[in-house]
């Protein structure tokens, strides 16, 4: 097999592939700073005789597969597969693999970090000292007072791998954890020490609300202005999932008025943030530049998962994270 890997990848996994006889060309998009044109990528795959391609930020569309008749396996170093035309891959007999849960720990830990940063006003207090405003030894004890997580109610919207990991971390802080996910049953949530509730009840009850759901299919926000108005006065909102989940104007209004104590945000309507975005001028907002999954360990996890499935595929075994089952049935002659 010959593999073109365009994703950041661990040295250990690259060495494992090479030791198994896989001819690997590694060109991380993070190092090149460039994404491939889908059709040109297909032509390159064909001309250089790659039968495997792995991406993280690049797109694999119909034109990619049509231009690469020798391609057999396509991997994406993400849980979501919206960057790959899976139906087109299936039509061309190409197996698609992904890496579910690769960044769950990273995003969960950043979520808790944002909760702590907003609750204890850490960026604000840091600026207070750096700007030489700390003159009274005791004044910040009152003016910079925060709140604790212990004993508070946390509401988690979305109980997938990330949401459940957040729940586990918050349970360790002694929080009472509520969860809302229309695709998860109350009994399954309870097994993870999460009390399943309806969304509106959660918003009215939670001191902290954290979002871990996908972007809405119809583009309408899950947290509308009416729902933000229902949130507990003084609550803190954390969003590391999707800016489209929240009515941005209503969020700014609630933060400006003090109805919401604070917000911690890792995602925005645009990346980078528009310089006119009013969130930039609010002192009760902690902002991070879409780095939820940006850890060394995330790269190690997706590298190991992709490597395992490439090797399984090479040996005629079903990949563990196969996305399009019909292709395997075509290849193998059975499920």
Image: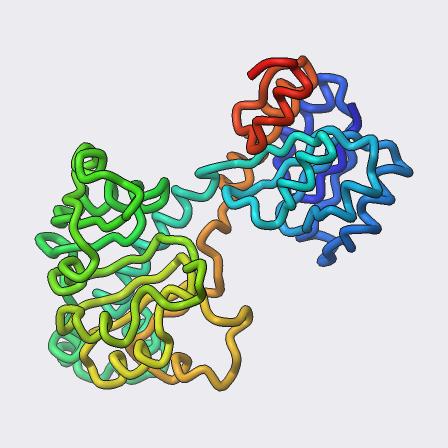
**Image position of 76 with respect to 137: above or below:** above
- Residue 179 visible, this orientation: yes
Measuring from the top left, give residue 241's x and y in whole percent. 40, 57
Measuring from the top left, give residue 237's x and y in whole percent. 27, 65
Residue at horizontal 57 percent and vertical 49 percent from the top: 82
28 or 72: nearer the viewer = 72
Left or right of 17 in this view: 121 = left
**Image position of 37 with respect to 84: above or below:** below
> Can you say which quadrant of the picture contains the N terminus?
top right
Circle count: 0
Left or right of 296 in this view: 5 = right
Residue at horizontal 55 percent and vertical 33 percent from the top: 323
> Can you say which quadrant of the picture contains the C terminus?
top right
Q: Which of the 4 image quarters holds residue 250?
A: bottom left
Residue at horizontal 87 percent and vertical 37 percent from the top: 46
- Residue 128 visible, this orientation: no
Residue at horizontal 64 percent and vertical 26 percent from the top: 327
Q: What colour scheme does the image use?
A: rainbow
**Image position of 113 with respect to 80: above or below:** below
304 or 86: nearer the viewer = 86
Measuring from the top left, give residue 243's x and y in whole percent. 42, 66
Left or right of 125 in this view: 8 = right
Determine the residue located farthest toward the right in the rendered image: 47
Measuring from the top left, give residue 316's x and y in whole percent. 66, 14
Left or right of 279 in this view: 320 = right
């Amino acid at each position: 097999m010959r593999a073109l890997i365009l994703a950041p990848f661990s040295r250990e996994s690259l060495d494992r592939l090479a030791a198994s006889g896989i001819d690997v060309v590694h060109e991380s998009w993070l190092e090149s700073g460039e994404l491939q044109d889908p059709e040109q990528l297909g032509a390159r795959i064909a001309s250089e005789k790659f039968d495997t391609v792995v991406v993280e930020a690049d797109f694999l569309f119909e034109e990619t597969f049509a231009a690469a008749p020798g391609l057999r396996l396509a991997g994406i170093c993400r849980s979501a597969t919206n960057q790959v035309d899976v139906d087109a891959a299936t039509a061309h007999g190409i197996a698609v693999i992904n890496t579910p849960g690769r960044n769950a720990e990273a995003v969960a830990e950043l979520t808790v970090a944002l909760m702590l940063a907003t609750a204890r006003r850490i960026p604000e207090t840091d600026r207070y000292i750096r700007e030489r405003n700390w003159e009274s030894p005791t004044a910040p004890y009152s003016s910079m007072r925060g709140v604790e997580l212990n004993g508070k109610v946390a509401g988690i919207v979305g109980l997938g791998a990330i949401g459940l990991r957040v729940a586990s971390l918050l349970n360790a802080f002694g929080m009472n954890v509520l969860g809302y996910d229309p695709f998860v049953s109350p009994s399954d949530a309870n097994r993870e020490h999460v009390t399943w509730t309806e969304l509106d009840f959660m918003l009215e009850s939670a001191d902290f609300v954290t979002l871990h759901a996908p972007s809405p299919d119809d583009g309408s926000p899950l947290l509308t202005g009416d729902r933000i108005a229902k949130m507990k006065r003084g609550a803190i909102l954390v969003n590391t999932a999707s800016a489209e989940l929240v009515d941005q104007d209503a969020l700014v209004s609630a933060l400006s008025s003090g109805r919401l104590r604070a917000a911690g945000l890792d995602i925005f309507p645009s990346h980078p943030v528009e310089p006119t975005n009013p969130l930039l001028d609010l002192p009760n907002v902690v902002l991070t530049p879409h780095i939820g999954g940006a850890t060394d360990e995330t790269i190690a996890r997706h590298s190991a998962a992709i490597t395992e499935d490439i090797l399984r595929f090479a040996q005629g075994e079903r990949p563990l994270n196969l996305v399009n089952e019909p292709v395997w049935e075509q290849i193998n002659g059975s499920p």
